Image: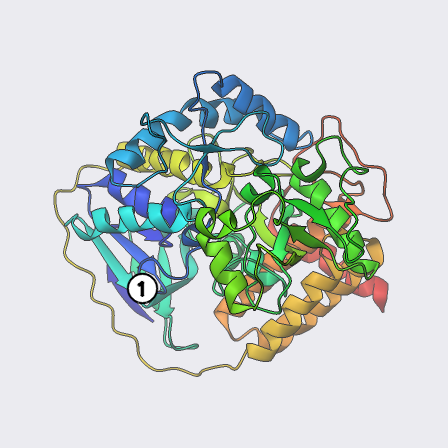
């Protein structure tokens, strides 16, 4: 195995959290591990709604924190909610300074959208539904002109190097060639900012590479994982046969769009006082029930927006057009899709994982902000806040470094395992048995399938990382014998609203649960 020693901080991932942290670490030398060209392949660039922040004079960080805690169904850490929401405004102003073209009113104020479970319009947006791509474009411009940042495009992280519970580096491979020889980058610190796990599901809004690999590699290295069972399913992914599924942003419902079934009947009014703007878990389950009943749920923008939808939400209009849907005249078919992983690598309030030398920010982390059900548009906000916190923590921990040589990685060819069918089987299993509604039989069956797939394809490091995260999700869901937030157990149907415990689990614990489940089936 080839090793390269560097003085650069290694950042795994190239989305919002990764790039923002790299900029905040400047002029300290960093290396950003990006499987795809910058701006491609990261969930951040696909985010439509925007960044939640109390920007209106009538709103407040306290109200934002209160909504966050309420939406999280009893497992949000209040101190984390206070920390993140208190600083939200500063990050909007910082992104504006960096060149993000947020939508502005004639008087120069920020145009704010209201999304589900927010008591106030506080989602700062760009061009209606293009916040993620526009914020990323602004950050990429800054990254390209910052000499301390080296981007290793076409490189994917597959593991962590650990010695005595200290992370000492990252194992990487050629992202375009499965099975290439591994190169280990020995680094003074590692920041994981490589996204969540939505792509582990057959129906997802996440980019194809976002399949739990970063969480899995940390778990395999011995890091503590928290709240793995809490996977958020976005209620209104477009049900048009695309993989990944295009997203019909929640802001559409904020503008008055309604949910109907094939009979033209609205169904959310009977489900929750806030109807279409109920918390995401409530709306997702209602839509899922309509799907199961064969009632073809749809998002109707005709009355609320009409032709305006095409100007206000150009991404949605584009997705509709390529599927022969005119949203001014036709309702948009929708279904719940895996969208955001509230769980992940457990961190403290400084963004540090349980392994020394390892920091985590963004969707790969579990900070305690999201609880069992993330409040809409808090994802990008958390990534920004903890990217800076991690950058500050790394800078405070390491001695100053003025410069570092560029990393030159050359990958030797290796055996290329064909894992496409195995990934397909894994994704189908997760959607079928670890999806919107779960029960003991399905979760037990899923764990058996995951074990069999891993046993057959364990020679592929990327697939082992996927299986590790899938195991943690299913095992966590099996032992949480209640319905709470996005975690719905049909065999424990009474939804728990009061205070609850966060789950904490090592991969070894999850593997024990998996082995017991497999023994139970045999």
Which is more toward the observer, 90 or 507?
90
- Where 373 falls versus 5 (above or below)? above
Location of the N terminus by quadrant is: bottom left
Residue 30 in the image, given as x and y percentages of width and height: 24, 49
Mark yes or no: residue 150 visible.
yes
Give the side of residue 13 with respect to residue 121, left or right. Answer: left
Q: Residues within 10 Å of mark 1 (few under 14, many from 20)?
A: some
- Picture coordinates of residue 269 (x, y %)? 77, 37
Q: Position of residue 26 (x, y in %)?
A: 20, 41
Identity of the residue drawn at 59% across and 25% down: 119
Residue 486 visible in the shown view? no
Question: Which of the 4 image quadrants contains residue 262?
Answer: bottom right
- Is 76 drawn above or below residue 484 in the view shown? above
Q: Position of residue 131 (x, y in %)?
A: 40, 45
Q: Is residue 314 left or right of residue 269?
A: left
Determine whether the residue tagged by mark 1 lies in a helix, strand or loop: loop
Q: Is residue 444 left or right of residue 195?
A: right
User: Residue at the location (68% across, 68% down)?
Assistant: 428
338 to 87, vertically: above or below: below
Toward the viewer: 420 or 243?
243
Q: Nearer the viewer, residue 380 or 17?
A: 380
- Numbered marks: total: 1
Quadrant where the C terminus sits is: bottom right
Q: Nearer the viewer, residue 459 or 27?
A: 27
- Residue sitting at x 66%, y 73%: 425
Residue that label 1 marks: 37
The image's colouring method is rainbow
Q: Quadrant of residue 501?
A: top right
């Amino acid at each position: 195995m080839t090793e390269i020693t560097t003085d650069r901080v290694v950042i795994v991932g190239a989305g919002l959290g990764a790039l923002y942290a790299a900029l905040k670490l400047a002029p300290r030398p960093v290396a950003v591990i990006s499987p795809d060209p910058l701006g491609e392949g990261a969930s951040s660039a696909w985010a439509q709604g925007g960044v939640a922040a109390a920007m209106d004079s009538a709103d407040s960080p306290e109200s934002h924190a209160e909504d966050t805690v309420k939406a999280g169904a009893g497992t949000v850490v209040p101190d984390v909610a206070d920390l993140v929401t208190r600083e939200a405004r500063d990050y909007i102003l910082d992104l504006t300074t960096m060149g993000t073209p947020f939508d502005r009113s004639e008087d120069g104020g920020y145009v704010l959208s209201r999304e589900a479970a927010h008591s106030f319009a506080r989602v700062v947006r760009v061009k209606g539904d293009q916040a993620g791509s526009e914020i990323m474009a602004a950050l990429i411009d800054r990254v390209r002109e910052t000499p301390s940042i080296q981007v290793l495009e076409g490189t994917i992280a597959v593991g962590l190097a650990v010695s005595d519970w200290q992370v000492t580096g990252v194992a990487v491979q050629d992202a375009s060639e499965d099975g290439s020889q591994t190169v280990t980058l020995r680094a003074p610190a590692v920041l994981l900012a490589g996204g969540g796990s939505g792509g582990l599901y057959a129906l997802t809004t996440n980019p194809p590479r976002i399949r739990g690999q970063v969480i899995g590699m940390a778990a395999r290295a011995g890091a503590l994982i928290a709240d793995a069972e809490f996977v958020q399913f976005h209620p209104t992914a477009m049900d048009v046969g695309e993989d990944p599924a295009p997203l019909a942003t929640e802001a559409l419902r904020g503008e008055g769009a309604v949910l109907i079934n094939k009979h033209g009947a609205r169904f959310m009014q009977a489900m929750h006082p806030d109807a279409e703007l109920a918390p995401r878990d409530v709306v997702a389950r209602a839509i899922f029930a309509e799907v199961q009943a064969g009632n073809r749920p749809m998002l109707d923008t005709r009355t609320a927006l009409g032709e305006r939808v095409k100007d206000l939400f150009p991404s949605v209009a584009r997705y509709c057009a390529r599927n022969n849907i005119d949203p001014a005249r036709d309702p948009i078919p929708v279904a719940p899709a895996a969208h955001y992983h509230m769980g992940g690598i457990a961190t403290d309030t400084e963004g540090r994982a349980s392994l020394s030398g390892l920091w985590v920010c963004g969707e790969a982390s579990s900070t305690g902000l999201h609880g069992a059900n993330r409040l809409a548009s808090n994802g990008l906000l958390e990534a920004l806040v903890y990217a800076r916190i991690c950058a500050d923590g790394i800078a405070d921990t390491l001695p100053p470094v003025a410069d570092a040589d560029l990393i030159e990685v050359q990958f030797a060819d290796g055996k290329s395992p064909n894992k496409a069918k195995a990934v397909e089987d894994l994704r189908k299993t997760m959607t079928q048995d670890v999806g919107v509604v779960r029960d003991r039989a399905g979760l037990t069956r899923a764990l058996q399938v995951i074990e069999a797939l891993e046993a057959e394809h364990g020679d592929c490091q990327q697939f082992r990382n996927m299986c590790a995260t899938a195991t943690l999700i299913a095992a966590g869901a099996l032992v949480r014998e209640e319905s709470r937030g996005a975690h719905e157990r049909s065999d424990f149907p009474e939804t728990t609203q009061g205070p609850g415990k966060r789950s904490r689990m090592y991969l070894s614990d999850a593997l024990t649960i998996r082995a017991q489940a497999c023994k139970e089936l045999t």
